[in-house]
Image (cartoon, coloured by chain):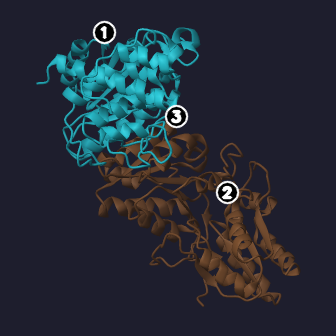
Chain colours: A cyan, B brown
Amino acid sequence: MTDIKDLQKISSQTRRDIVRMVHAVQSGHPGGSLGCTEFFVALYHHIMEYKASPFDPDGKNEDLFFLSNGHISPVYYSVLSRAGFFPVSELNTFRKIDSRLQGHPTTHEGLPGIRIASGSLGQGMSVAIGAALSKKQNQDPHLVFSLHGDGELQEGQIWEAAMFAAAHKVDNLISTIDANGQQIDGATDNVLPMGNLAQKFEAFGWDVLSVDKGNDMAAVVEGLEAAKARTGKGKPVAVILKTDMGAGVDFMAGTHEWHGIAPNDEQLAAALGQLEETLGDY
Amino acid sequence: MKKYTDQGAKDTRSGFGAGLSELGKTNPNVVALCADLTGSLKMNAFADAHPERFYQVGIAEANMMGIAAGLTIGGKIPFTGTFANFSTGRVYDQIRQSIAYSGKNVKICASHSGLTLGEDGATHQILEDIGLMKMLPGMTVINTCDFNQTKAATIAIADYDGPVYLRFGRPKVANFTPADQKFEIGKALLLQEGTDVTIAATGHMVWKALEAAESLAAQGISAEVLNFHTIKPLDEEALLNSIRKTGALVSAEEHQMAGGLGESLAGVLARKHPAPQEFVAVNDSFGESGKPEELLEKYGLSSPAIVEAAKKVLKRK
Protein backbone atom coordinates (compact mmCIF):
# COMPACT_ATOMS: atom_id res chain seq x y z
CA MET A 1 0.00 0.00 0.00
CA THR A 2 1.24 3.44 -0.92
CA ASP A 3 2.16 5.56 2.05
CA ILE A 4 0.28 8.84 2.56
CA LYS A 5 3.64 10.63 2.67
CA ASP A 6 4.52 9.24 -0.77
CA LEU A 7 1.20 10.48 -2.16
CA GLN A 8 1.86 13.91 -0.67
CA LYS A 9 5.24 13.98 -2.40
CA ILE A 10 3.62 13.20 -5.74
CA SER A 11 1.07 15.94 -5.02
CA SER A 12 3.80 18.52 -4.48
CA GLN A 13 5.41 17.60 -7.80
CA THR A 14 2.00 17.65 -9.52
CA ARG A 15 1.41 21.18 -8.27
CA ARG A 16 4.81 22.24 -9.59
CA ASP A 17 3.89 20.71 -12.95
CA ILE A 18 0.55 22.56 -12.97
CA VAL A 19 1.91 26.04 -12.32
CA ARG A 20 4.86 25.50 -14.67
CA MET A 21 2.63 24.24 -17.51
CA VAL A 22 0.21 27.13 -17.18
CA HIS A 23 3.01 29.67 -16.83
CA ALA A 24 4.82 28.36 -19.91
CA VAL A 25 1.93 29.11 -22.25
CA GLN A 26 0.37 31.90 -20.18
CA SER A 27 -3.01 30.17 -20.38
CA GLY A 28 -4.92 27.33 -18.75
CA HIS A 29 -6.72 26.71 -15.50
CA PRO A 30 -4.51 26.45 -12.41
CA GLY A 31 -7.14 27.05 -9.67
CA GLY A 32 -9.30 23.95 -10.02
CA SER A 33 -6.25 21.87 -10.95
CA LEU A 34 -4.46 22.74 -7.71
CA GLY A 35 -7.66 22.14 -5.72
CA CYS A 36 -8.13 18.64 -7.14
CA THR A 37 -4.51 17.51 -6.86
CA GLU A 38 -5.03 15.23 -3.85
CA PHE A 39 -8.05 13.64 -5.54
CA PHE A 40 -6.17 12.86 -8.76
CA VAL A 41 -3.05 11.61 -7.02
CA ALA A 42 -5.05 9.40 -4.66
CA LEU A 43 -7.11 8.05 -7.55
CA TYR A 44 -4.21 7.17 -9.87
CA HIS A 45 -1.62 6.20 -7.28
CA HIS A 46 -3.74 4.37 -4.76
CA ILE A 47 -7.43 3.80 -5.55
CA MET A 48 -7.80 2.68 -9.17
CA GLU A 49 -6.67 -0.55 -10.81
CA TYR A 50 -5.49 0.18 -14.33
CA LYS A 51 -2.86 -0.46 -16.94
CA ALA A 52 -1.06 2.68 -18.12
CA SER A 53 0.99 1.11 -20.87
CA PRO A 54 0.07 -0.10 -23.37
CA PHE A 55 -3.03 2.05 -23.05
CA ASP A 56 -6.27 0.25 -23.97
CA PRO A 57 -8.98 2.74 -25.04
CA ASP A 58 -11.63 0.09 -24.38
CA GLY A 59 -10.45 -0.22 -20.78
CA LYS A 60 -11.75 -3.74 -20.27
CA ASN A 61 -10.89 -5.30 -16.90
CA GLU A 62 -9.60 -2.06 -15.42
CA ASP A 63 -11.08 0.86 -13.49
CA LEU A 64 -11.88 3.90 -15.63
CA PHE A 65 -11.85 7.62 -14.89
CA PHE A 66 -13.70 10.38 -16.77
CA LEU A 67 -12.98 14.06 -16.23
CA SER A 68 -16.17 15.98 -16.90
CA ASN A 69 -14.84 19.45 -16.03
CA GLY A 70 -12.14 19.21 -18.69
CA HIS A 71 -10.66 22.63 -18.06
CA ILE A 72 -8.63 21.29 -15.16
CA SER A 73 -6.53 19.44 -17.71
CA PRO A 74 -3.18 20.50 -16.14
CA VAL A 75 -3.66 18.28 -13.10
CA TYR A 76 -5.01 15.46 -15.29
CA TYR A 77 -2.03 15.58 -17.65
CA SER A 78 0.52 15.79 -14.86
CA VAL A 79 -0.96 12.82 -13.03
CA LEU A 80 -1.38 10.73 -16.19
CA SER A 81 2.20 11.34 -17.24
CA ARG A 82 3.62 10.57 -13.83
CA ALA A 83 1.48 7.43 -13.69
CA GLY A 84 3.17 6.24 -16.90
CA PHE A 85 0.58 6.89 -19.60
CA PHE A 86 2.94 9.11 -21.62
CA PRO A 87 6.38 10.69 -21.16
CA VAL A 88 6.61 13.38 -18.49
CA SER A 89 8.61 15.49 -20.95
CA GLU A 90 5.46 15.86 -23.05
CA LEU A 91 3.99 18.17 -20.38
CA ASN A 92 6.22 20.75 -22.04
CA THR A 93 3.88 20.74 -25.07
CA PHE A 94 0.71 21.67 -23.13
CA ARG A 95 -1.55 23.96 -25.20
CA LYS A 96 1.11 24.38 -27.89
CA ILE A 97 0.58 23.71 -31.57
CA ASP A 98 0.88 20.06 -32.72
CA SER A 99 0.52 18.80 -29.14
CA ARG A 100 -1.44 15.84 -27.84
CA LEU A 101 -2.03 17.91 -24.68
CA GLN A 102 -4.84 20.09 -25.95
CA GLY A 103 -6.30 22.90 -23.84
CA HIS A 104 -9.09 20.55 -22.91
CA PRO A 105 -8.60 16.75 -22.88
CA THR A 106 -9.43 14.87 -26.06
CA THR A 107 -9.07 11.48 -27.67
CA HIS A 108 -8.59 13.19 -31.03
CA GLU A 109 -4.79 13.42 -30.86
CA GLY A 110 -4.50 9.95 -29.35
CA LEU A 111 -3.17 10.90 -25.92
CA PRO A 112 -2.96 7.72 -23.81
CA GLY A 113 -5.17 7.89 -20.74
CA ILE A 114 -7.99 9.90 -22.31
CA ARG A 115 -11.16 8.10 -23.37
CA ILE A 116 -13.51 11.02 -24.07
CA ALA A 117 -13.25 14.68 -24.96
CA SER A 118 -14.47 17.08 -22.30
CA GLY A 119 -14.58 20.82 -21.88
CA SER A 120 -18.12 21.72 -22.80
CA LEU A 121 -19.55 21.09 -19.35
CA GLY A 122 -22.16 18.68 -18.10
CA GLN A 123 -21.50 15.72 -20.39
CA GLY A 124 -19.12 13.53 -18.42
CA MET A 125 -21.57 11.90 -16.03
CA SER A 126 -23.62 10.53 -18.94
CA VAL A 127 -20.45 9.17 -20.54
CA ALA A 128 -19.33 7.59 -17.26
CA ILE A 129 -22.76 5.95 -16.90
CA GLY A 130 -22.44 4.54 -20.42
CA ALA A 131 -19.00 3.12 -19.64
CA ALA A 132 -20.37 1.66 -16.39
CA LEU A 133 -23.23 0.00 -18.29
CA SER A 134 -20.71 -1.35 -20.79
CA LYS A 135 -18.82 -2.92 -17.88
CA LYS A 136 -22.01 -4.53 -16.64
CA GLN A 137 -22.71 -5.84 -20.17
CA ASN A 138 -19.21 -7.29 -20.26
CA GLN A 139 -19.49 -8.72 -16.72
CA ASP A 140 -16.43 -6.68 -15.83
CA PRO A 141 -16.44 -6.03 -12.05
CA HIS A 142 -14.24 -2.93 -12.26
CA LEU A 143 -15.44 0.55 -11.36
CA VAL A 144 -15.99 3.80 -13.21
CA PHE A 145 -15.01 7.11 -11.59
CA SER A 146 -15.93 10.59 -12.72
CA LEU A 147 -15.15 14.10 -11.54
CA HIS A 148 -17.39 17.15 -11.91
CA GLY A 149 -17.06 20.76 -10.88
CA ASP A 150 -19.72 22.12 -8.54
CA GLY A 151 -20.43 24.99 -10.92
CA GLU A 152 -20.83 22.36 -13.63
CA LEU A 153 -23.86 21.01 -11.79
CA GLN A 154 -25.76 24.01 -13.13
CA GLU A 155 -25.89 22.15 -16.46
CA GLY A 156 -29.18 20.30 -16.85
CA GLN A 157 -27.68 17.19 -18.42
CA ILE A 158 -26.03 16.36 -15.09
CA TRP A 159 -29.45 15.90 -13.50
CA GLU A 160 -30.75 13.85 -16.41
CA ALA A 161 -27.76 11.60 -15.81
CA ALA A 162 -28.20 11.57 -12.04
CA MET A 163 -31.84 10.52 -12.44
CA PHE A 164 -30.93 7.75 -14.88
CA ALA A 165 -28.05 6.35 -12.82
CA ALA A 166 -30.25 5.82 -9.79
CA ALA A 167 -33.23 4.52 -11.78
CA HIS A 168 -31.04 1.99 -13.59
CA LYS A 169 -29.07 1.09 -10.44
CA VAL A 170 -25.69 1.99 -11.91
CA ASP A 171 -23.89 0.95 -8.75
CA ASN A 172 -20.44 0.55 -10.29
CA LEU A 173 -20.08 4.32 -10.62
CA ILE A 174 -18.46 6.79 -8.21
CA SER A 175 -19.03 10.40 -9.21
CA THR A 176 -17.06 12.98 -7.26
CA ILE A 177 -18.11 16.61 -7.05
CA ASP A 178 -15.28 19.10 -6.63
CA ALA A 179 -17.13 21.36 -4.20
CA ASN A 180 -14.82 24.36 -4.13
CA GLY A 181 -17.68 26.83 -4.15
CA GLN A 182 -16.15 28.84 -6.98
CA GLN A 183 -16.83 29.39 -10.65
CA ILE A 184 -15.64 31.88 -13.26
CA ASP A 185 -17.87 34.78 -12.27
CA GLY A 186 -17.39 34.33 -8.54
CA ALA A 187 -18.64 32.19 -5.66
CA THR A 188 -21.24 29.62 -6.74
CA ASP A 189 -23.49 31.00 -4.00
CA ASN A 190 -23.42 34.36 -5.75
CA VAL A 191 -23.62 33.14 -9.35
CA LEU A 192 -26.37 30.54 -8.93
CA PRO A 193 -26.80 29.06 -5.46
CA MET A 194 -27.32 25.29 -5.68
CA GLY A 195 -28.42 24.59 -2.13
CA ASN A 196 -27.45 21.38 -0.39
CA LEU A 197 -25.67 19.19 -2.93
CA ALA A 198 -25.59 16.09 -0.75
CA GLN A 199 -29.34 16.31 -0.20
CA LYS A 200 -29.93 16.85 -3.89
CA PHE A 201 -28.04 13.69 -4.86
CA GLU A 202 -29.73 11.76 -2.05
CA ALA A 203 -33.11 12.93 -3.32
CA PHE A 204 -32.10 11.66 -6.76
CA GLY A 205 -31.47 8.23 -5.25
CA TRP A 206 -27.70 8.22 -4.84
CA ASP A 207 -25.61 6.98 -1.93
CA VAL A 208 -23.79 10.15 -0.88
CA LEU A 209 -20.73 10.65 1.25
CA SER A 210 -18.93 13.87 2.01
CA VAL A 211 -15.22 14.50 2.40
CA ASP A 212 -14.78 17.82 4.17
CA LYS A 213 -10.99 17.99 3.85
CA GLY A 214 -10.50 17.50 0.13
CA ASN A 215 -6.91 18.74 0.27
CA ASP A 216 -5.91 16.44 3.11
CA MET A 217 -4.46 13.33 1.47
CA ALA A 218 -5.37 10.96 4.29
CA ALA A 219 -8.96 12.22 4.29
CA VAL A 220 -9.24 11.89 0.50
CA VAL A 221 -7.87 8.36 0.48
CA GLU A 222 -10.17 7.38 3.33
CA GLY A 223 -13.16 8.95 1.56
CA LEU A 224 -12.50 7.25 -1.77
CA GLU A 225 -11.91 3.89 -0.09
CA ALA A 226 -15.22 4.29 1.74
CA ALA A 227 -16.88 5.15 -1.58
CA LYS A 228 -15.45 2.00 -3.17
CA ALA A 229 -16.83 -0.06 -0.31
CA ARG A 230 -20.29 1.36 -0.99
CA THR A 231 -20.43 0.30 -4.66
CA GLY A 232 -22.34 -2.78 -5.77
CA LYS A 233 -25.25 -2.09 -3.46
CA GLY A 234 -27.85 -0.94 -5.94
CA LYS A 235 -27.06 2.79 -5.93
CA PRO A 236 -24.59 5.05 -7.70
CA VAL A 237 -22.19 6.66 -5.24
CA ALA A 238 -21.57 10.42 -5.02
CA VAL A 239 -18.64 11.95 -3.17
CA ILE A 240 -19.00 15.60 -2.23
CA LEU A 241 -15.36 16.62 -2.00
CA LYS A 242 -14.81 20.00 -0.38
CA THR A 243 -11.64 21.51 -1.78
CA ASP A 244 -9.93 24.89 -1.89
CA MET A 245 -9.53 26.23 -5.37
CA GLY A 246 -5.86 27.04 -5.78
CA ALA A 247 -4.84 24.88 -2.78
CA GLY A 248 -1.10 24.58 -2.14
CA VAL A 249 -0.13 28.04 -3.38
CA ASP A 250 -1.05 30.58 -0.72
CA PHE A 251 -1.82 33.52 -2.98
CA MET A 252 -3.96 31.40 -5.34
CA ALA A 253 -6.00 29.60 -2.68
CA GLY A 254 -9.62 30.14 -1.77
CA THR A 255 -10.59 32.49 -4.59
CA HIS A 256 -12.05 32.21 -8.08
CA GLU A 257 -9.45 34.75 -9.30
CA TRP A 258 -7.09 31.97 -10.42
CA HIS A 259 -9.73 29.90 -12.20
CA GLY A 260 -8.36 30.60 -15.64
CA ILE A 261 -5.34 32.87 -15.49
CA ALA A 262 -1.65 32.09 -15.52
CA PRO A 263 1.04 33.30 -13.09
CA ASN A 264 3.72 35.71 -14.31
CA ASP A 265 7.44 35.03 -13.77
CA GLU A 266 7.51 36.42 -10.21
CA GLN A 267 4.32 34.63 -9.25
CA LEU A 268 5.67 31.38 -10.67
CA ALA A 269 8.84 31.75 -8.61
CA ALA A 270 6.77 32.47 -5.50
CA ALA A 271 4.55 29.44 -6.15
CA LEU A 272 7.47 27.09 -6.79
CA GLY A 273 9.06 28.35 -3.59
CA GLN A 274 6.12 26.84 -1.72
CA LEU A 275 6.23 23.47 -3.53
CA GLU A 276 9.03 20.98 -3.01
CA GLU A 277 10.44 19.33 -6.15
CA THR A 278 10.07 15.67 -5.24
CA LEU A 279 10.15 13.71 -8.50
CA GLY A 280 12.12 16.04 -10.75
CA ASP A 281 10.59 18.76 -12.90
CA TYR A 282 9.77 17.87 -16.49
CA MET B 1 -31.90 -0.93 -66.70
CA LYS B 2 -34.21 -2.27 -64.03
CA LYS B 3 -37.58 -0.66 -63.79
CA TYR B 4 -38.52 0.03 -60.19
CA THR B 5 -42.02 -0.71 -59.00
CA ASP B 6 -43.68 -0.11 -55.67
CA GLN B 7 -43.88 -3.41 -53.80
CA GLY B 8 -46.43 -1.88 -51.39
CA ALA B 9 -46.14 1.22 -49.23
CA LYS B 10 -44.28 0.88 -45.96
CA ASP B 11 -42.73 3.35 -43.53
CA THR B 12 -38.97 3.72 -43.41
CA ARG B 13 -38.99 3.70 -39.60
CA SER B 14 -40.32 0.14 -39.73
CA GLY B 15 -37.32 -0.69 -41.91
CA PHE B 16 -35.14 0.61 -39.10
CA GLY B 17 -37.05 -1.48 -36.56
CA ALA B 18 -36.68 -4.58 -38.71
CA GLY B 19 -32.96 -3.99 -39.21
CA LEU B 20 -32.38 -3.40 -35.51
CA SER B 21 -34.32 -6.53 -34.68
CA GLU B 22 -32.12 -8.57 -37.01
CA LEU B 23 -28.97 -7.03 -35.53
CA GLY B 24 -30.21 -8.07 -32.11
CA LYS B 25 -30.05 -11.68 -33.24
CA THR B 26 -26.77 -11.48 -35.14
CA ASN B 27 -24.56 -9.02 -33.25
CA PRO B 28 -24.35 -9.36 -29.44
CA ASN B 29 -22.51 -6.04 -29.14
CA VAL B 30 -25.44 -4.04 -30.50
CA VAL B 31 -27.29 -2.16 -27.76
CA ALA B 32 -30.16 0.29 -28.20
CA LEU B 33 -31.28 3.40 -26.36
CA CYS B 34 -34.56 5.24 -26.72
CA ALA B 35 -35.89 8.49 -25.29
CA ASP B 36 -39.54 7.59 -24.71
CA LEU B 37 -40.40 6.94 -28.36
CA THR B 38 -39.97 3.18 -28.57
CA GLY B 39 -43.22 2.65 -30.44
CA SER B 40 -42.71 5.54 -32.83
CA LEU B 41 -39.20 4.31 -33.69
CA LYS B 42 -40.42 0.69 -34.02
CA MET B 43 -37.82 -0.45 -31.49
CA ASN B 44 -40.25 -2.69 -29.58
CA ALA B 45 -39.15 -5.92 -31.21
CA PHE B 46 -35.53 -5.35 -30.18
CA ALA B 47 -36.54 -4.16 -26.70
CA ASP B 48 -38.78 -7.18 -26.13
CA ALA B 49 -36.29 -9.73 -27.43
CA HIS B 50 -33.23 -8.21 -25.73
CA PRO B 51 -34.32 -6.29 -22.62
CA GLU B 52 -30.78 -6.56 -21.20
CA ARG B 53 -29.44 -4.66 -24.21
CA PHE B 54 -32.15 -2.00 -24.37
CA TYR B 55 -32.00 1.22 -22.32
CA GLN B 56 -35.08 3.37 -21.85
CA VAL B 57 -33.60 6.77 -20.92
CA GLY B 58 -36.81 8.76 -20.64
CA ILE B 59 -37.24 12.22 -22.14
CA ALA B 60 -33.58 13.10 -21.79
CA GLU B 61 -31.88 13.10 -25.18
CA ALA B 62 -28.67 14.84 -24.07
CA ASN B 63 -28.11 12.13 -21.49
CA MET B 64 -28.90 9.47 -24.10
CA MET B 65 -26.15 10.72 -26.40
CA GLY B 66 -23.62 10.81 -23.58
CA ILE B 67 -24.52 7.31 -22.37
CA ALA B 68 -24.26 6.04 -25.94
CA ALA B 69 -20.76 7.55 -26.21
CA GLY B 70 -19.77 5.85 -22.95
CA LEU B 71 -21.19 2.48 -24.00
CA THR B 72 -18.75 2.34 -26.92
CA ILE B 73 -15.93 2.17 -24.37
CA GLY B 74 -15.78 -1.57 -23.86
CA GLY B 75 -16.91 -2.43 -27.38
CA LYS B 76 -20.67 -1.94 -27.44
CA ILE B 77 -22.33 -0.58 -30.59
CA PRO B 78 -25.09 1.75 -29.41
CA PHE B 79 -28.05 2.71 -31.60
CA THR B 80 -29.95 5.74 -30.29
CA GLY B 81 -33.55 6.29 -31.32
CA THR B 82 -35.66 9.40 -31.23
CA PHE B 83 -37.14 11.94 -33.66
CA ALA B 84 -34.69 13.66 -36.01
CA ASN B 85 -35.29 17.00 -34.31
CA PHE B 86 -34.30 15.59 -30.91
CA SER B 87 -31.48 13.52 -32.45
CA THR B 88 -29.64 16.56 -33.78
CA GLY B 89 -30.55 20.15 -32.96
CA ARG B 90 -31.48 19.42 -29.37
CA VAL B 91 -28.26 17.55 -28.65
CA TYR B 92 -25.80 19.10 -31.05
CA ASP B 93 -23.12 19.89 -28.52
CA GLN B 94 -23.34 16.43 -26.97
CA ILE B 95 -22.91 14.84 -30.40
CA ARG B 96 -20.14 17.25 -31.33
CA GLN B 97 -17.98 16.72 -28.25
CA SER B 98 -18.82 13.30 -26.83
CA ILE B 99 -19.42 11.47 -30.13
CA ALA B 100 -17.93 13.18 -33.19
CA TYR B 101 -14.81 14.82 -31.71
CA SER B 102 -14.30 11.79 -29.49
CA GLY B 103 -14.64 9.48 -32.52
CA LYS B 104 -17.21 7.22 -30.88
CA ASN B 105 -18.94 4.37 -32.67
CA VAL B 106 -22.48 5.61 -32.04
CA LYS B 107 -25.34 5.15 -34.53
CA ILE B 108 -27.73 8.10 -34.23
CA CYS B 109 -30.99 6.84 -35.71
CA ALA B 110 -33.53 9.52 -36.43
CA SER B 111 -37.15 9.10 -37.43
CA HIS B 112 -39.86 11.62 -38.31
CA SER B 113 -37.45 13.81 -40.25
CA GLY B 114 -38.67 16.57 -42.53
CA LEU B 115 -42.13 17.79 -43.46
CA THR B 116 -43.63 14.30 -43.73
CA LEU B 117 -43.85 14.07 -39.96
CA GLY B 118 -47.08 15.87 -40.80
CA GLU B 119 -49.68 17.11 -38.39
CA ASP B 120 -47.42 17.79 -35.40
CA GLY B 121 -46.10 20.82 -37.25
CA ALA B 122 -42.90 22.79 -37.48
CA THR B 123 -41.73 22.29 -33.87
CA HIS B 124 -41.04 18.66 -34.79
CA GLN B 125 -40.38 18.89 -38.55
CA ILE B 126 -36.65 19.37 -38.66
CA LEU B 127 -35.37 20.43 -42.07
CA GLU B 128 -31.86 21.35 -40.94
CA ASP B 129 -30.55 18.05 -39.60
CA ILE B 130 -28.55 16.93 -42.65
CA GLY B 131 -26.69 20.22 -42.58
CA LEU B 132 -26.04 20.05 -38.86
CA MET B 133 -24.70 16.53 -39.09
CA LYS B 134 -22.67 16.80 -42.29
CA MET B 135 -20.72 19.74 -40.87
CA LEU B 136 -19.30 17.56 -38.11
CA PRO B 137 -15.87 16.18 -39.04
CA GLY B 138 -15.93 12.40 -39.37
CA MET B 139 -19.71 12.07 -39.26
CA THR B 140 -21.33 9.77 -41.83
CA VAL B 141 -24.76 11.01 -42.95
CA ILE B 142 -27.31 8.66 -44.49
CA ASN B 143 -30.90 9.37 -45.60
CA THR B 144 -32.62 6.24 -46.85
CA CYS B 145 -35.45 6.18 -49.39
CA ASP B 146 -37.68 3.25 -48.44
CA PHE B 147 -38.32 0.36 -46.05
CA ASN B 148 -35.92 -2.09 -47.69
CA GLN B 149 -33.08 0.39 -47.92
CA THR B 150 -33.56 1.58 -44.34
CA LYS B 151 -33.42 -2.00 -43.09
CA ALA B 152 -30.30 -2.69 -45.14
CA ALA B 153 -28.63 0.52 -44.00
CA THR B 154 -29.39 -0.19 -40.33
CA ILE B 155 -27.66 -3.54 -40.66
CA ALA B 156 -24.74 -2.11 -42.65
CA ILE B 157 -23.84 0.68 -40.24
CA ALA B 158 -23.29 -1.79 -37.41
CA ASP B 159 -20.30 -3.12 -39.36
CA TYR B 160 -18.83 0.34 -39.90
CA ASP B 161 -16.62 1.69 -37.11
CA GLY B 162 -17.46 5.36 -36.55
CA PRO B 163 -20.28 7.80 -35.83
CA VAL B 164 -23.25 7.63 -38.18
CA TYR B 165 -26.39 9.72 -38.56
CA LEU B 166 -29.17 7.60 -40.09
CA ARG B 167 -32.19 9.64 -41.17
CA PHE B 168 -35.60 8.20 -41.99
CA GLY B 169 -39.24 9.09 -41.60
CA ARG B 170 -42.76 8.50 -40.45
CA PRO B 171 -45.15 8.01 -43.39
CA LYS B 172 -45.79 4.96 -45.51
CA VAL B 173 -44.06 5.49 -48.84
CA ALA B 174 -43.34 3.39 -51.91
CA ASN B 175 -41.09 0.42 -51.11
CA PHE B 176 -39.22 -0.20 -54.34
CA THR B 177 -35.59 -1.12 -53.75
CA PRO B 178 -34.76 -4.85 -53.87
CA ALA B 179 -35.12 -6.53 -50.49
CA ASP B 180 -31.76 -8.29 -50.99
CA GLN B 181 -29.81 -5.19 -52.03
CA LYS B 182 -26.69 -4.81 -49.90
CA PHE B 183 -26.23 -1.31 -48.54
CA GLU B 184 -22.89 0.28 -49.35
CA ILE B 185 -22.13 3.43 -47.34
CA GLY B 186 -20.99 6.27 -49.58
CA LYS B 187 -21.98 4.62 -52.87
CA ALA B 188 -24.72 6.39 -54.80
CA LEU B 189 -27.05 4.16 -56.79
CA LEU B 190 -27.81 4.72 -60.44
CA LEU B 191 -31.54 3.95 -60.64
CA GLN B 192 -32.23 5.06 -64.18
CA GLU B 193 -29.97 6.01 -67.05
CA GLY B 194 -30.60 9.17 -69.04
CA THR B 195 -28.81 11.69 -71.21
CA ASP B 196 -30.43 15.13 -70.84
CA VAL B 197 -30.49 15.87 -67.13
CA THR B 198 -29.37 14.25 -63.86
CA ILE B 199 -31.78 14.07 -60.94
CA ALA B 200 -29.93 13.42 -57.70
CA ALA B 201 -32.31 12.67 -54.84
CA THR B 202 -32.19 11.44 -51.28
CA GLY B 203 -34.71 9.99 -48.82
CA HIS B 204 -38.39 10.21 -49.60
CA MET B 205 -37.65 12.27 -52.72
CA VAL B 206 -36.01 9.36 -54.55
CA TRP B 207 -39.34 7.76 -55.49
CA LYS B 208 -40.62 11.17 -56.56
CA ALA B 209 -37.54 11.54 -58.74
CA LEU B 210 -38.38 8.26 -60.47
CA GLU B 211 -41.96 9.46 -61.00
CA ALA B 212 -40.62 12.74 -62.39
CA ALA B 213 -38.29 10.90 -64.76
CA GLU B 214 -41.23 8.92 -66.13
CA SER B 215 -43.16 12.13 -66.68
CA LEU B 216 -40.15 13.76 -68.35
CA ALA B 217 -39.70 10.74 -70.63
CA ALA B 218 -43.28 11.17 -71.81
CA GLN B 219 -42.29 14.71 -72.77
CA GLY B 220 -39.21 13.54 -74.65
CA ILE B 221 -36.66 14.42 -71.94
CA SER B 222 -34.22 11.72 -70.85
CA ALA B 223 -33.49 11.97 -67.14
CA GLU B 224 -30.85 10.03 -65.23
CA VAL B 225 -31.81 9.28 -61.63
CA LEU B 226 -29.27 8.82 -58.83
CA ASN B 227 -30.10 7.79 -55.28
CA PHE B 228 -27.70 9.60 -52.96
CA HIS B 229 -28.61 7.69 -49.82
CA THR B 230 -25.29 8.79 -48.35
CA ILE B 231 -24.79 12.54 -48.18
CA LYS B 232 -21.44 12.19 -46.43
CA PRO B 233 -19.07 10.83 -47.57
CA LEU B 234 -20.41 11.99 -50.91
CA ASP B 235 -19.99 9.80 -53.99
CA GLU B 236 -18.38 12.51 -56.13
CA GLU B 237 -17.49 10.09 -58.93
CA ALA B 238 -21.11 8.99 -59.38
CA LEU B 239 -22.17 12.62 -59.69
CA LEU B 240 -19.37 13.62 -62.05
CA ASN B 241 -19.86 10.55 -64.28
CA SER B 242 -23.48 11.50 -64.71
CA ILE B 243 -22.95 15.25 -65.15
CA ARG B 244 -20.23 14.69 -67.78
CA LYS B 245 -22.95 12.97 -69.76
CA THR B 246 -26.01 15.16 -69.04
CA GLY B 247 -24.48 18.55 -68.22
CA ALA B 248 -27.30 19.59 -65.89
CA LEU B 249 -28.40 18.72 -62.34
CA VAL B 250 -31.58 18.77 -60.31
CA SER B 251 -31.14 17.93 -56.63
CA ALA B 252 -34.16 16.84 -54.61
CA GLU B 253 -34.45 16.45 -50.86
CA GLU B 254 -36.84 16.88 -47.95
CA HIS B 255 -34.58 19.42 -46.25
CA GLN B 256 -33.61 23.07 -46.31
CA MET B 257 -31.76 24.11 -49.43
CA ALA B 258 -29.09 25.51 -47.12
CA GLY B 259 -27.00 22.68 -45.75
CA GLY B 260 -28.58 19.86 -47.69
CA LEU B 261 -27.59 17.31 -50.33
CA GLY B 262 -27.98 19.87 -53.11
CA GLU B 263 -25.45 22.16 -51.52
CA SER B 264 -22.95 19.32 -51.18
CA LEU B 265 -23.44 18.41 -54.84
CA ALA B 266 -23.13 22.06 -55.91
CA GLY B 267 -19.80 22.22 -54.12
CA VAL B 268 -18.51 19.29 -56.17
CA LEU B 269 -19.70 20.87 -59.41
CA ALA B 270 -18.15 24.23 -58.52
CA ARG B 271 -14.80 22.63 -57.77
CA LYS B 272 -14.60 19.99 -60.46
CA HIS B 273 -17.13 20.37 -63.27
CA PRO B 274 -19.25 23.54 -63.34
CA ALA B 275 -22.78 22.88 -64.58
CA PRO B 276 -26.20 24.43 -64.02
CA GLN B 277 -28.19 23.11 -61.05
CA GLU B 278 -31.72 23.59 -59.76
CA PHE B 279 -32.65 22.80 -56.17
CA VAL B 280 -35.84 21.02 -55.14
CA ALA B 281 -35.73 21.69 -51.40
CA VAL B 282 -37.38 23.85 -48.76
CA ASN B 283 -36.32 27.43 -49.30
CA ASP B 284 -35.46 29.06 -45.97
CA SER B 285 -38.79 28.28 -44.35
CA PHE B 286 -40.26 26.37 -41.43
CA GLY B 287 -42.97 23.82 -42.11
CA GLU B 288 -46.49 23.63 -40.68
CA SER B 289 -49.24 21.16 -39.77
CA GLY B 290 -50.89 19.16 -42.51
CA LYS B 291 -50.93 15.79 -44.23
CA PRO B 292 -47.51 14.67 -45.50
CA GLU B 293 -48.45 14.77 -49.19
CA GLU B 294 -50.16 18.15 -48.80
CA LEU B 295 -47.05 19.55 -47.17
CA LEU B 296 -44.70 18.16 -49.81
CA GLU B 297 -46.83 19.74 -52.51
CA LYS B 298 -47.16 23.10 -50.75
CA TYR B 299 -43.43 23.37 -50.09
CA GLY B 300 -42.46 22.37 -53.62
CA LEU B 301 -41.21 18.85 -52.91
CA SER B 302 -43.35 16.98 -55.47
CA SER B 303 -42.78 15.09 -58.71
CA PRO B 304 -44.20 17.99 -60.76
CA ALA B 305 -41.79 20.34 -58.96
CA ILE B 306 -38.89 18.10 -60.02
CA VAL B 307 -40.21 18.08 -63.60
CA GLU B 308 -40.39 21.88 -63.62
CA ALA B 309 -36.89 22.14 -62.16
CA ALA B 310 -35.58 19.80 -64.86
CA LYS B 311 -37.11 21.89 -67.64
CA LYS B 312 -35.70 25.03 -66.05
CA VAL B 313 -32.19 23.66 -65.76
CA LEU B 314 -32.24 22.40 -69.34
CA LYS B 315 -32.73 25.98 -70.53
CA ARG B 316 -29.58 26.98 -68.65
CA LYS B 317 -27.35 24.39 -70.33
Compute the Cα span from label 2 to label 3.
Answer: 34 Å
Please, which chain is the residue tagged with disc 3 on? Answer: A
Q: Point out which mark residue B116 bears.
A: 2
Question: Could you say which disc has been placed on residue A120 in the image?
Answer: 3
**Dot 3 amino acid type:** Ser
Rendered view: A127 above or below A39: below
Above or below B86: residue B195: below
Measured in 3D between alpha carbons, the distance from the residue under mark 1 to the one under mark 2, in whole angstroms, is: 58 Å
Whether A128 is drawn above or below B99: the answer is above
Q: Alpha carbon of mark 3 to alpha carbon of mark 1: how far?
A: 28 Å
Q: Disc 1 marks which amino acid?
A: Lys
Letter of the chain that mark 2 sits on in the rendering: B
Mark 3 vs mark 1: tell me if same chain.
yes
Foreground mark, 1 or 2, reads 1
- The one of A30 and B220 positioned closer to us in this rendering: A30
* Mark before the other along the chain sequence, 3 or 1: 3
Query: Is label 2 in contact with label 3 (beta carbons under 8 Å)?
Result: no
Q: Is residue B275 above or below residue A13?
A: below
Left or right placement of residue B95 versus residue A111 in this view: right
On residue A167, which mark appears?
none
Horizontal side of A166 relative to A234 (left or right) equals: right
Q: Residues within 10 Å of mark 1 (few under 14, many from 20)?
A: some
Q: Are marks 1 and 2 on the same chain?
A: no
Secondary element at tag 3:
loop
Image location of residue B14, percent across then percent down? 50, 61
Q: Quadrant of residue A175?
A: top left
Q: Position of residue A78 (x, y in %)?
A: 34, 32
* In the image: residue B149, left or right of residue A81: right
